[in-house]
Image (cartoon, grey):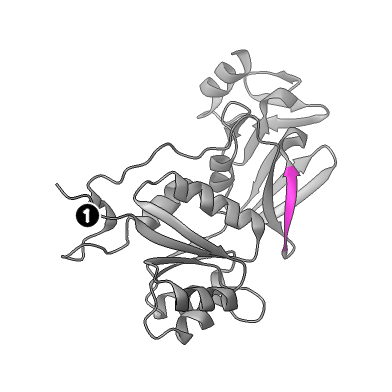
Amino acid sequence: MHRPEPVKCLIVDDEPPALEVLKTYLKAVPSLRLVGECTNALEAFQRLREEAVDVLFLDIQMPQLKGTELVRSLKNPPKVIFTTAHREYALDGFELDAVDYLLKPFSFDRFLKAVDKLPFGREGGTLSAVTGAMPVVAPPVVPESAEFLYFRSDRKMVKVFLHEILYLESLKDYVRIVTQSGQVITKQPISSVEEMLPERSFRRIHRSYLVSLDKVTSFTATHLTLGSKELPIGKLYKHEVEKALRG
């Protein structure tokens, strides 16, 4: 049986952390092949004139030329998956017939859902329909040795060292990341941040709280403390929290 050629992908993003995340995700899916990365839309425009690609993973808010403007300038654009921190461009994205619209930071699972929408094959099936069950080498989780993550806050990407995090608090559409040296507030659900953190080091203790396990100084059946800060343990999380703290 003939195996389809890997899907050729080009990443376009002006933020180095975002480039690294996408490269890690792409490497975990053998049916995708990264053929290049560009740090602005003008560079991507030139690259696309020299080489045909199947899929663009494209940021929108970039200097000189926006990602949406790049797509409009192409006579025969490849399939596009927008990757952006800005919700307000969603309508533009879908008007341009984008395959999907990923809000940063997005998890590996969400990335896979977007990739599986890619229409390929003679009958126009999805990528997994063409290749069989979509092959994945291994989910690119954050390793225990990882030192930091970047979070978008106040229009910039802020580096947060994992060993400094005390706890994270959900504030509806935002998350407060409290560290030993201050705090960072980023606009995203706490569930998406939870997926980015190494599970052995961080644990959800309540619908509104995630904590760094090694910063916990004491706990009861209903609360735990991190230094002078006391946080509630939700009833639904009690068993798993006690197991993690004792384990």
Q: Residue 30's spot in the image, x, y percent? A: 37, 46
Q: Residue furthest front?
A: 50
Q: Quadrant of residue 99?
A: bottom left
Whether residue 173 is visible, yes or no, is no
Q: Secondary structure at mark 1?
A: helix
- Kindly identify the residue that appears in the image at 40 percent across and 80 percent down: 95
Q: Residue 198's spot in the image, x, y percent? A: 59, 33
Dot 1 amino acid type = Val
Q: Magenta segment, which residues?
A: 156-160
Residue 229 higher or lower than 247, as above or below:
below
**Main SS of residues in magenta:** strand
Residue 108 higher or lower than 8, as above or below:
above
Q: Quadrant of residue 182?
A: top right
Q: Is residue 189 left or right of residue 82?
A: right
Residue 5 higher or lower than 10, as above or below:
above
- Kindly identify the residue that appears in the image at 79 percent across and 47 percent down: 183
- Kindly identify the residue that appears in the image at 39 percent across and 58 percent down: 114
Q: What residue is shown with label 1?
A: 130
Q: Is residue 1 left or right of residue 46?
A: left
Q: Residue 34's spot in the image, x, y percent? A: 46, 56
Q: Residue 74's spot in the image, x, y percent? A: 44, 83
Q: Residue 136 in magenta? A: no
